[in-house]
Amino acid sequence: MKMEREAQLARFAANAVFVRCERYGAGHINSTYLAAADNGKKYILQRINDHVFSDVQRLMENITAVTEHIRARTQDPRSAPAFIPTTDGKLWFRDAEGCWRMQEFEENTICLQRAETPEDFRESAVAFGRFQRLLSDFPAERLHETIPNFHNTPDRFRILEETVRRDPMGRVKNVLREIDYALSQKDTVSQLQKLRDDGTLPVRVTHNDTKLNNVLFDAATRKAVCVIDLDTVMPGLSLYDFGDAIRFGAVCGAEDERDPDRVSFSSELFRVYTNGYLSACGKELTREELELLPLGALTITMECGVRFLTDYLDGDHYFATTRAEQNLDRARTQFKLYADMRKQEHTMHTAVKEELLL
Ligand code: ADP
Ligand code: GN1
Ligand code: MG
């Protein structure tokens, strides 16, 4: 029987005879395969979504620069997965089916879709905090902005409003309440972009997808080994990275839960993450950044809800869906979480202050 993706595997200089290749992971954007060679070595083969990432060469240049910096700082080969060049010495290649790259599978690691214990969540915070610290001396302006305005919240609102006006699927009438709610929060969550524009907040190297499933844990010790999925590494605000991890992890309930009332924000988990994050990079952050951590969580949660809602209105072209109204459910869970966070803003601020004193 022909193995999946045989033609693509053959294009990489892995010096391996592949015996197995199957779909792997659970991302919304790229397609990931796990390939195994006859000597037991494993590799990750990925088709990069070039609708989302229109300039794959620049994306790979960003990842290479950042991984090399991390490896040089840590002297640890496990600190960032190595990419396998193509047989003609390139970082990736394109064929009729898309754009492909290969990296070494980080052995003896596990990847969790959700934290099984608060300690797992804390470890993910240590990983992202360390990532931030190790890259604090990397000149962020050297990175390409591979998705322009990726976390520009006012611009995400502009696109929502434009999609509402166009209403290409005739779905606006189903979600008037959600649209009103999002728009009522626009000023609150546009503040960080303003503080970036006026120079109050530093532009840093940011990961931009700080979900727990983008951290690999050591299978034996369960300590964080490295951060993966560097596709969205770009210049940005640390607060968005912090906030995205909270949005995804300091919650009960799934991102696409159908009943938003079953989703809630956990201020206890917020504190757990803050503790791990500040232990790894607290000293690198400015006073303004530290004060605004709770607003980071609020901002990215609303922004993500706005993106899901926009994609629902636009006909579900961006985020992969497996059922009707999944993007609408995702938008509603984000708005519910946001509302919970607003109620617990004071608790979040107290947690940051107390963690800073420890
Ligand atoms: P996506 O953009 O689809 O989230 P990721 O780069 O996060 O893609 O990869 C998807 C999954 O593949 C990860 O969640 C992880 O389980 C696994 N994975 C990716 N890279 C590696 C690696 N170098 N070693 C081990 N597992 C990996
Ligand atoms: C996408 O690829 P994945 O599933 O990790 C998205 C993130 C969203 C996330 C929501 C490039 O991430 O920005 O926060 O879905 N990535 C891109 O689950 O748009
Ligand atoms: Mg991922």
Image: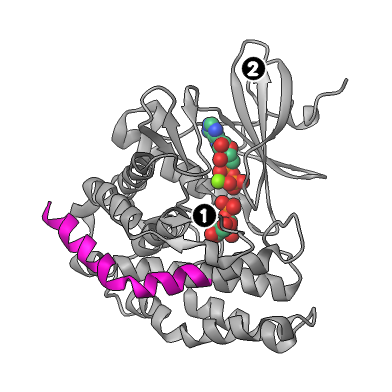
Mark 2 and mark 1 lie on one chain; the one further toward the N terminus is 2
**Relative to the observer, which residue lies in front, 110 or 351?**
351
- Residue at 44% in and 25% down: 219
Give the amino acid type for the residue marked by disc 1 in the picture: Thr
Q: In which quadrant is the N terminus drawn?
A: top right
Q: Position of residue 33 (x, y in %)?
A: 68, 34
Q: Are marks 2 and 1 in contact (CB under 8 Å)?
A: no
Q: Which residue is mark 2?
A: 15
Q: Position of residue 115 (x, y in %)?
A: 44, 43
Disc 1 within 8 angstroms of ligand 2 (CB): yes
Q: Is residue 101 left or right of residue 155?
A: right
- Residue at 33% in and 70% down: 344
Q: How many marks?
A: 2
Figure quadrant of residue 196: bottom left
Is 355 inside the magenta-drawn segment?
Answer: yes
Q: CA distance from mark 2 to mark 1?
A: 29 Å
Q: Which residues are magenta?
A: 335-358
| Type of secondary structure dominating the magenta stretch | helix
Figure quadrant of residue 66: top left
Query: Helix, strand or loop at disc 2?
Result: loop
Foreground mark, 2 or 1, reads 1
Mark 1 is surrounded, within 10 Å at the Cα level, by few (under 14), some (14 to 19) or many (20 or more) other residues, namely some
Query: Helix, strand or loop at disc 1?
Result: helix
Q: Residue furthest top?
A: 39
Number of the label disc, if any, that sits on residue 232: 1
